[in-house]
Image (cartoon, rainbow, N blue to C red):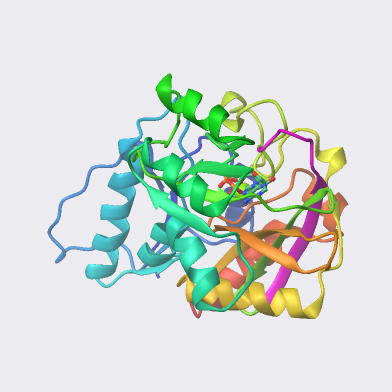
Amino acid sequence: MKIAFLYEHPTWSDTLIAEFKHQGVALTLRNIAELSFDTDTTDQPFDAAINRINVMPSAEREPQIVFQTLHYLNWLELAGVRVINGARAHFIGASKAMQNGVFSALGLPHPRAIVIYRPADALAAADKIGYPVIIKPNIGGSGSGVARYNTRAELAETIRFGALDLGIDRSGLVQQYIQSDGYVYRVEVLGDQLFYSIRQPINEGCYNYCAADESRHPSENSDDTSDFCVHGTDRIEAFSASESIVDEVIKIVRHCGADLGGVEYLIDPNTGAPCFYDFNPYSNFVSNGEALLQFSPENRYIDFILESLGIA
Ligand SMILES: Nc1ncnc2c1ncn2[C@@H]1O[C@H](COP(=O)(O)OP(=O)(O)O)[C@@H](O)[C@H]1O
Ligand SMILES: [Mg+2]
């Protein structure tokens, strides 16, 4: 079986790729940043593709890559290629509007949100939702463009200065602000099995969690070997997610059409109930994952991929 490995960040998949090699699995590496493709489907060189492309916009990357990727994944599927985390999963991963819709469709707790594309519409949306509100770009990642507005005046001023950031497709969510117990939680699953669950303390006013540390965008750190909280990893801890949360995450990932993925949530300090707000099809690996998780996430990921492709 010919397997393509689709990636974009120059180093984030290094350990994983090395481990595939170590296990004797041949991969054709495809850096999506350099991708052009012939639309002819008759001479498809791959039987399967593993999608490890991050949807997150970054300063060093042309935003069009996000859209080129969506076309490519859809085209691969059209050509009969089995894509691990294919077009639907990738699209939902790139659309916070869809993610919130999935939580709603599954009857799961989530923040109320209104999707806008004109910054001026944020005021009416926030009036409906009530302050404080969180405004976030539809296509996000690593907390980019996420901001909290405590009052109407604060939001109105930001709009007046043309400073409301709706990200690369200029659509965004005006979202109810969720109270938390002081942590962001993330549960990752491989199919219908728990992969791992980790949490990280929240820094007030900081929205960059679970892809990098509090201060720097991960793209500034191309030497890092991991994409999950690449700095400040001492603040990440493994925790034991309840069975019901794991079941809910499995349902979410399945509903998103993903083979594997992670879901983030906050916990209401008064009720203990989760509130889901983010789905990531791009499964992350913790820096020094083995030390934190007591198993090699790369090995488990590879086992799952090989099983999914029927070559275990
Ligand atoms: N509705 C919300 N209420 C309170 N905090 C939020 C809300 N949505 C997001 N956050 C905070 O902002 C961070 C980034 O938001 P998220 O939706 O995960 O965007 P990204 O895809 O960029 O990671 C979250 O980890 C969380 O700490
Ligand atoms: Mg997030």
* Relative to 155, residue 67 above or below: below
Please give the name of the residue rendered at 45% of the width and 72% of the height, measured from the top-left corner: 257
Q: Decide whether residue 205 is among the magenta residues.
A: yes
Residue 56 image point, x, y percent: 49, 41
* Relative to 282, residue 143 above or below: above
Task: Report if residue 306 is visible in the image.
Answer: no
Q: Seen in the image, is 116 located left or right of residue 222?
A: left
Q: Quadrant of residue 76?
A: bottom left
Please give the name of the residue rendered at 66% of the width and 32% of the height, measured from the top-left corner: 224
- Farthest top residue in view: 161
Q: Seen in the image, is 195 located left or right of residue 308?
A: right
Task: Report if residue 189 is visible in the image.
Answer: yes
Q: Seen in the image, is 74 located left or right of residue 113?
A: left
Quadrant where the N terminus is found in the figure: bottom left
Q: What segment is highlighted magenta in the picture?
A: 193-207
Residue 179 image point, x, y percent: 75, 52
Q: Decide whether residue 40 is among the magenta residues.
A: no
Secondary structure that dominates the magenta span: strand
